[in-house]
Amino acid sequence: VQLQACGGGLVQAGGCLRLSCAASARTFSRYQMGWFRQAPGKEREFVAAINWSGDRTDYADSVKGRFTISRDNAKGTVYLRMNSLKPEDTAVYYCAVDLRPTGLGLNRNKHEYDYWGQGTLVTVSS
């Protein structure tokens, strides 16, 4: 599975961006997907996750109410809509796929995700 993330850029505080992550495998639709981010000098952290069908989502407290994760299985793509961006949202954002069997809970553990995209940089200026 290859994941290609894009959509990052430079935005002012209060602005918005939409990240996209396209998967190469047709089996993408069977698995949950996650977004993580890594700021300079910090560990990679969980941002959001979505189950295979798109009807269950989970968010880190720091982004809840501002970010929305969604997916289009027909296009093999997962999205992260980011509103009301803050300077502390500045990071490289990564998408990832969790190949564990469906039916398990949404996963915040980065060590349990199997494939990762290359990352896309989001910079929020104050």
Image (cartoon, rainbow, N blue to C red):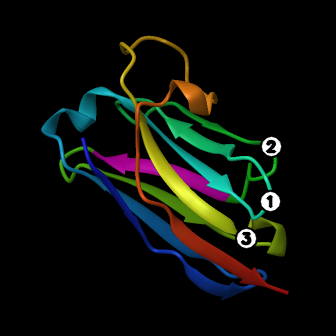
Tell me how far mark 2 sits from mark 3, CA to CA: 16 Å
Q: Mark 1 points at which residue?
A: 41
Q: Where is residue 55 in the image (x, y as percent from the top left)?
A: 45, 32
Q: From the viewer's perspective, is the residue at label 2 or at label 1 nearer?
A: 1
Going by the numbered disc 1, the residue's amino acid type is Gly
Labelled disc at residue 90? 3
Which residues fall within the magenta stretch? 67-72
Dot 2 or dot 1, earlier in sequence: 1
Q: Where is residue 104 in the image (x, y as percent from the top left)?
A: 48, 12
Q: Main secondary structure of the magenta part?
A: strand
The C terminus: image quadrant: bottom right
Q: Which residue occupies the foreground of this view, 22 or 81?
A: 22
Number of marks in the image? 3
Dot 1 or dot 3, earlier in sequence: 1
Q: Which residue is drawn at 19% across and 49% down?
A: 24
The N terminus: image quadrant: top left
Q: How crowded is mark 2: few (under 14 residues within 10 Å), some or many (20 or more)?
A: few
Q: Where is residue 51 in the image (x, y as percent from the top left)?
A: 44, 30
Tell me how far mark 2 sits from mark 1, CA to CA: 21 Å
Q: Name the residue under label 2.
A: 61
Q: Which residue is drawn at 34% across and 28% down?
A: 31
Task: Tell me: residue 20, above or below residue 101.
Answer: below
